[in-house]
Image: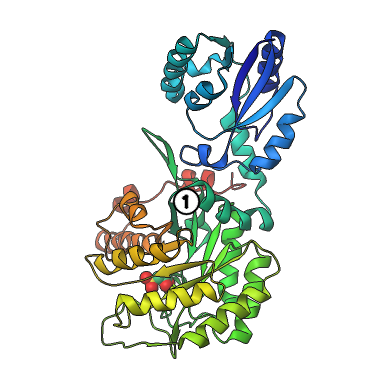
Amino acid sequence: METIYLGMTGDIIHPGIINIIHEGSKRGKVMVGLLTDSAIAAHKRLPYLTYEQRKEVVENLKGVDSVVPQEDWSYVPNLLKYRPDAIIHGDDWKTGPLCKIREEVYKVMGEIGGEVIEIPYTQGINSSALNEMHRAIGTTPDIRMKTLRRLLQAKPILRIMEAHSGLSGLIIENIEITKEDGTHSYDGMWSSSLTDSTSKGKPDIEAVDLTTRLQDLTNILECTTKPIIYDGDTGGKSEHFVFTVRTLERNGVSAVIIEDKVGLKKNSLFGTEVKQELASIPEFCEKISTGKKSQVTKDFMIIARLESLIAGYPVSDALERAIAYVKAGADGVMIHSKEKTGEDIREFCRLFRAEYAQVPIVLVPTTYNQFKEQELAAWGANIIIYANHMLRASYPAMVNVAKIILENERSLEADPLCMPIKQILELIPGGK
Ligand code: SPV
Ligand code: MG
């Protein structure tokens, strides 16, 4: 019997997919190449279900004979590996972004002496609309929390953007651009202490308590599905940190980052006149391990933030601390610096990677912003946080409009700078 190869994500099963399986099974044994998270993540949003869950669904579909992982967005490696007699695909790939994929498939199937079966695309089924619906359904705290670890497994580098309100969260949730290699979007959100305080007109000195910060976080949680990394400042006293961890975990936040400062915390990017004291290594290790012991699930992450470079200590100090914090149970490290060249950060990444090949490194390239994500990934970084840009972008925009209205004594001139009311109503789900 012939083997018919069919590649799919298997996240949303609709009649169009059933039809392709049916057509394939008429010809032979259907082998499903199920795309892994990492095959998908560089091109599209991560599926709702994990690979194992999708596999369980697809294996049980009538007409499916076997399921194999497809680790690459391209079909080529699997076609060469399994050498099926034919590959089956909907004819929708004749146009649009899948065109290139189709070309390579024809070439490879020609080489291995196989056939390409194209069947008419089932009309009336719009996968993007199904995806939209799935987004509207939302997520659960448990699924959201796990997504950060899944993304870390699936993607070499994650981009995280600061959100300080439901509205900024919505932008990060939905904004997408198409590039040659697929759709680019943000992987998650940073709940920043700086922008949270600033949006409330307060200084970034742990002035806003957890309960108040949770109110804004709840607004973000309500209208988004992407994972959230929470800026936990110093984490406070160990005894208090336990409650922070549990509260964040219960709400579906994926990770908290705590920094190794003591005394009144000041924002790390302040001028040199603010000399911040660092916690002793044992003291901070104790806070990390107390936090780790207090979490309920395996999924929540506690990331240790190294302030050595900010406080004027050398890279060696940061490295010594990083190693101790990982040994105490930290699931990742964040290293911060004001140095514009990025040299200190690069050096830290090199040394830390020599010790730990896998432990995630988080970078906040606010000052050394000349480096692109791929360059930082090459240094060894796994997560890039754009820590304050949504708030900083909104301020000059608001000041400008406020001034224009003052100058003109009416709002007509400011209107082109403002989002149309209609667009606002369409933006907010349920607002129409
Ligand atoms: C924040 O966003 O609040 C941070 C990062 O802690 S930074 O402001 O760069 O210190
Ligand atoms: Mg902060």
Residue farthest toward the left in the current orientation of the protein: 341
User: Residue 104's x, y, as percent?
Assistant: 43, 19
User: Residue 424's x, y, as percent?
Assistant: 49, 48
Q: Is residue 430 visible?
A: yes
User: Residue 72's x, y, as percent?
Assistant: 50, 33
Q: Residue at x 46, y 50 (%)?
A: 186
Q: Residue at x 51, y 53 (%)?
A: 152
Crowd class of label 1 (few under 14; some 14 to 19; many from 20; radius 10 Å): some
Where does label 1 land, which residue?
171
- For the N terminus, give its image quadrant: top right
User: In the displayed structure, would residue 4 be above or below residue 401?
Assistant: above
User: In the displayed structure, would residue 400 be above or below residue 295?
Assistant: above
Q: Is 401 or 14 nearer to us in this picture?
A: 14
The reply, left or right, for residue 348 in relation to residue 70 is left
SS at badge 1: helix
Q: Is residue 197 visible?
A: no
Q: Is 380 or 254 nearer to us in this picture?
A: 380
The reply, left or right, for residue 43 in relation to residue 288 is left
User: Residue 385's x, y, as percent?
Assistant: 41, 60
User: In the displayed structure, would residue 105 be above or below residue 217?
Assistant: above
- For the C terminus, give its image quadrant: top right
> Residue type at mark 1?
Ile
Q: Is 67 or 367 nearer to us in this picture?
A: 67
The reply, left or right, for residue 152 in relation to residue 119 is left
